[in-house]
Image (cartoon, grey):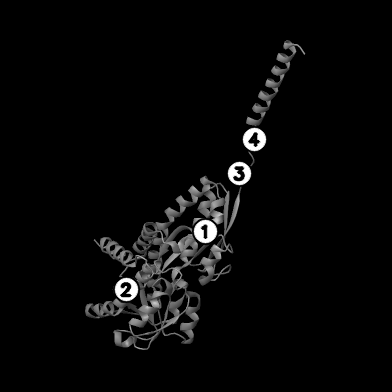
Amino acid sequence: MTLKTWIRIAGMLLLTLAGAAVLNGCKQEGPAQNFELSYSIFFPPTHVQCIAATNWAQDIEKRTGGRIKIKVYPAGSLTKADQCFEGVVNGISDIGMSCFAYTPGRFPLLEGLDLPVGYPNGAVATRIANDMVRKYKPQELGGVEVLYVHAHGPGILASKKPVKSLEDLKGLKVRATGLSKSIADKLGATPVAMPQPETYEALSKGVVEATLCPIETLKGWKQGEAIQYVVDSTAIGYTTAMFVVMNKDKWAKLPADLRKIVAEVSQEYVAKHGAAWDEADKAGREFVTQLKREFIALPEAEQQKWKAAVKPVLDAYVKQAKDKNLPGDALLADIQAAIAQAGK
């Protein structure tokens, strides 16, 4: 074969390779992948926080151009309140919302968020809860992707009997959850553990005589119908922090652009959930006012007695955290400083 023939063959090969490269570069990428996700929520569909969560899901669908669609399962229809977190870890639901307090001992550091430290409102409690999760990055949340957390306004005592002093609390059967069980105990009451969905019936049947709860609960869960008195115990106002988390594997499968959108929308909803809690508290107060329930204000001296009574709850939390090599003392100090700053 002559040199001229070799040159001609080589040229033809180069043209063929170049053409293939051009065609390959012009290939259209396949359609963007879509994701359908399930979201387990223990709140009933009419509750303001379920509505806020549904709006969050709809905003994500809109902002992603429909590439992410989220089906909400309210009222514990997919996983019950105390099974929600593990349900997300194990893939029963892709996303879940419930209370840290519903699984005592599972979140030993974040139990500190619920302490009776005098939270003024839901917006402050929600902002502080998110700040603490970001700062401390607790290992107890390592099995999921944390989207955000939120927390209700100050817990109060709603009762079927008048409570005007610590003496009136002795032996009173009080529904409580998580650390609020310890609060009820230190106040001299008899704590009865149960989640919100069971409380209305328990109050109606006399299984419990009172409940520690944010005032919004009296409307959101209709519990105002089953009590007669609302005691202003905001001096020891606790909260109940709630997680919104996503299955790690499902999060990892989302493309970076979609993860960015979910994170952005979630950050926006921190303030929206906090505001929703405060609007719900206002509505709850109006609801029981219309029902002509009696409001009981504690004198300053009595408020100080209640604060002294629950201080061992704070001390016990710090000790338990220390025993587990967790920075509970620092977390508590940060929360108290943030509440003090919010009051200025």
Q: Give the residue number, with chain letter if any, for mark 1.
A: 246
Element under disc 2: helix
Marks 1 and 4, the one that precedes in the sequence: 4
Disc 3 packing (10 Å; few <14; some 14–19; many ≥20): few
Element under disc 4: loop
Number of the front mark, 3 or 1: 1
- In the rendered image, residue 52, in percent from the top left (x then y), is placed at 47, 60
Number of the front mark, 1 or 2: 2
- In the rendered image, residue 125, in percent from the top left (x then y), is placed at 36, 64
- Real-space Cα separation, disc 3 to disc 1, in angstroms: 21 Å
Report whether 165 appears left or right of 59.
Answer: left
Element under disc 3: loop
Kind of residue sitting beneath label 2: Leu
Report whether 192 appears left or right of 88.
Answer: left
Task: Establish if 26 lies above or below 58.
Answer: above
For residue 28, the mark is 4
Task: Identify the residue at image location x=37%, y=81%.
Answer: 184
- Real-space Cα separation, disc 1 to disc 2, in angstroms: 30 Å
- Real-space Cα separation, disc 4 to disc 2, in angstroms: 61 Å
- Real-space Cα separation, disc 4 to disc 3, in angstroms: 11 Å
- Real-space Cα separation, disc 3 to disc 2, in angstroms: 51 Å
Marks 3 and 1, the one that precedes in the sequence: 3
